[in-house]
Image (tube, grey):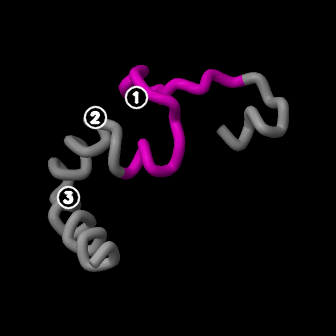
Amino acid sequence: MRLQERRVPCPSLCPICEQHDEDDWHVMFGCAVSIQARHAAGLGFNLETRLQQNLS
């Protein structure tokens, strides 16, 4: 999205899932493939726990 704001021609769809616009939030929390990879690496629980703590 930031590149497009600077008029750099690039696709806006997430290159991983190709279903939603790519932005920071989508890559970290919205992309199902990214979430699966994070869980497979054992990082899902830690990240989700910290996110919930920060939102409370």
Q: CA distance from mark 3 to mark 2?
A: 12 Å
Would residue 49 be counted in the magenta stretch?
A: no
Left or right of 40: which side holds 35? right
Residue indicated by mark 3: 44
Task: Pick the residue in front: 25 or 36.
Answer: 25
**Which portion, as a residue range, is magenta?**
10-28
Using the rendered view, name the quadrant where residue 52 is placed.
Answer: bottom left
- Residue 38 coordinates in the image, percent (x, y): 25, 51
Whole-angstrom CA distance, mark 2 to mark 1, is 7 Å
Q: Callout 3: 10 Å neighbours few (<14), some, many (20+)?
A: some
Q: Position of residue 9 (x, y in %)?
A: 76, 23
Quarter placement of the C terminus: bottom left
Image: 38 above or below 14: below
Horizontal placement of 8 versus 20: left or right?
right
Q: Which residue is mark 2?
A: 33
Q: Which tag, 2 or 1, sits closer to the chain's start?
A: 1
From what the image shows, is residue 19 above or below residue 29?
above
